[in-house]
Image (cartoon, helix red, strand yellow):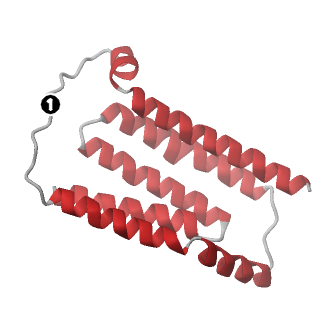
Amino acid sequence: MAINFILVVALLLAALWTVMTARLIRSAFGLALTSAVLAILLFRLDSPMAAVFELSVCAGLIPVIFVTTISLTHRLSQDAFQIRQKERWGKYWYLLVIVVLVGVLLSRRALLPDVPLPVVTHPTDVRIVMWNMHHVDLLGQVAVILAGVFGVVILFKEVKK
């Protein structure tokens, strides 16, 4: 149980670093790190299908698309970078507060006695697992892919201007 808590903390730190860094390339690598930690957590929570999909698509494919797109853009000057960094911390300071509050609430929940999870049989057919047991997982994966696609489209629209 302690390893899961450490993984959740690592996941939150990697996600915060991804959002708060001003360099796009670091943000893309932070996304890959966040997805890799999430995949490890999913494996530990006995959800190997979701973990493999997370690792292959979100930690592999999406960051490659982002790095490719970023390589087609130009770097900010040092002055523009510093201004952007200050603006970002000024705009999103509350994210740190939200993450700490959620962490405190989740840790209070972790102090409650363990409730046994329902026993789930592991079907061997991938179709049954993906379409009958993991609807929410699939929706999350589709949302991540669409967010990446829309991010790339917005980046290209800004570059053309």
Q: What percent of the width, then of the height, locates residue 156? A: 81, 50
Q: Residues within 10 Å of mark 1 (few under 14, many from 20)?
A: few
Q: Is residue 51 left or right of residue 113?
A: right
Question: In the image, 110: left or right of 48?
Answer: left
Residue at horizontal 73%, vertical 57%?
70
Q: Secondary structure at mark 1?
A: loop
The picture quadrant where one finds residue 20 is bottom right
Query: Residue 76 at x, y = what percent?
Result: 79, 73
The image shows residue 117, relative to residue 155, as above or below, that is above
Q: Which is more toward the observer, 98 or 31?
A: 98
| Residue at the spot 25% in from the left edge and 18% down from the top edge | 123
- 57 in relation to 41, above or below: above
- The residue at the far right in this view is 161
Instruction: Locate the C terminus and report the quarter of the image it occupies.
Output: bottom right
- Residue 159: horizontal and vertical position, in percent? 86, 56
Frontmost residue, 55 versus 15:
15
Q: Residue 98 appears at what percent x and percent y?
A: 43, 66
Mark 1 = which residue?
118
Q: Quadrant of residue 129?
A: top left
Amino acid type for the residue under numbered disc 1 = Pro
Closer-to-camera residue (85/72): 85
Please report the residue visible at 49 percent of the width from the left and 68 percent of the height from the top. Answer: 95
Question: Dividing the image into 4 quarters, which one contains the N terminus?
Answer: bottom left
| Residue drawn at 51 percent across, 54 percent down | 32
